[in-house]
Image: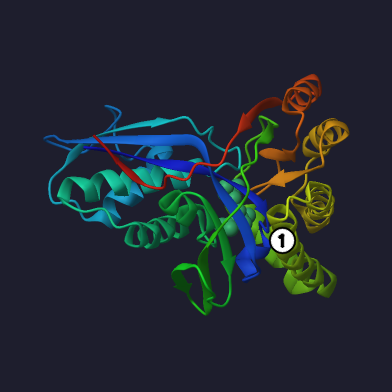
Amino acid sequence: MAASAPGKLILFGEHAVVFGEPALCTAINLRAEVFVRPYKEWRADGGALDEPRYRDVKGAVEKAKARAPMWVEVRAMVPSGAGLGSSAAVTVATLGALHGIAGGLDPPTIAREAFEVEHEVQGRASPIDTSTAAAGGALLVLREPREDLLWTIERDTRRWCLHRARLPDLEFVIGNTGISAATGPLVAKVKDRVERDPRAADMVREIGRITLEGLAALQRRDLVQAGRLMDRDHALLTELGVGHEMLDRLVAAARPSSYGAKLTGAGGGGSIVALTDRPDETVGAIRAAGGKAFVVRPDSAGVTKQP
Ligand code: PMV
């Protein structure tokens, strides 16, 4: 049995979403595939499940309460530590394969379980990347339910309502700094700032407004306005303390050939996303500035059983 799940690209709202502000995310055409087969003991790519790099797989195995041990194999096209949701994709695909072997595969159940795994592995988090990996396509996260609600996820006193969002067919250029930064400490850093500084709390709310304006701009294909909002979002995230000199360098390289560019995901390293209709030029500029660059497209398929 095998299942796959997509990586994700946060277009607007990272970090702010942890505080319940809106965020917009799309699944991308870089997927993780996980194969499982009954075996006499638990194995991950032939080794022990206890190795730190298999903590998402192990978390998913514990959550799925598999009855018999399995040999698990992981293949991920999503680069890890790049802010593109590789751990969420691996968690969701593992849950997909384990549920698939036992029968059905229910995306809302997998989204909830994967969020719990991510919370245990990473610490404070939002369900944005795990739900996007489960649902595929574009998702708008809001505090209150509206039309096009997919599911709701709650934790402590927080609630996220995950909605289907419709975006025009767009290509995005990713610029990866090659610097991997753990999400947990970055999320904790922003929390600390927001608790101590009311200006940081205002910035989080501004990111929330930018997300809704950005979605509206993308939907009416006003790429100039969407790009401006991306630039502003990048500045706010940097002020919140999750920027990096290399992210600024890649954003600066991408902007002359783009409508806008911003860090995507947790920051502190990881990647930028540029909105451009000259992808080759943007890819070349990011590479010349020392980043890895590639083009991604939205992927409408969420967690999927493989034949
Ligand atoms: O870099 P990633 O893929 O871990 O994205 C994290 C997005 C945050 O908003 C920073 C955290 C979260 O869980 O929502």
| Vertical side of 70 occupied by 126: above or below | below
Left or right: residue 84 versus residue 260 is left
Quarter of the image with the C terminus in it? top left
Indicate the position of residue 228 as horizontal and vertical percent values: 85, 51
Q: In this view, does 136 lie to the left or right of 179?
A: left
Where's residue 188, x and y in %? Answer: 64, 60
Give the camera-side residue of 98 and 278.
Answer: 278
Tell me what residue is drawn at x 68 percent, y 66 percent.
Answer: 191
- Residue type at numbered disc 1: Ala
Q: Is mark 1 within 8 Å of ligand 1?
A: no
Colouring: rainbow
Q: Which residue is drawn at 83% across and 39% down?
A: 248
Asked which quadrant contains residue 272, the reply is top right
Q: Residue at point 73% right, 44% down?
A: 263
Front residue of 199/152: it is 152
Does residue 137 sit above or below 176 in this rendering? below
What residue is pinned by disc 1?
216
Q: In screen coordinates, is 165 left or right of 251?
A: left
The secondary structure type at the circle numbered 1 is helix
Tell me the crowding category of disc 1: few under 14, some 14 to 19, or many 20 or more residues within 10 angstroms, Cα based.
some
Q: Which residue is drawn at 60% across and 37% down?
A: 82
- Residue 208 image offset from top left, x and y in percent: 72, 67
Q: Where is residue 47 in the image (x, y as percent from the top left)?
A: 29, 29
Q: Is residue 175 above or below residue 191?
A: above
Q: Which of 257 and 43 is in front in this view?
A: 257
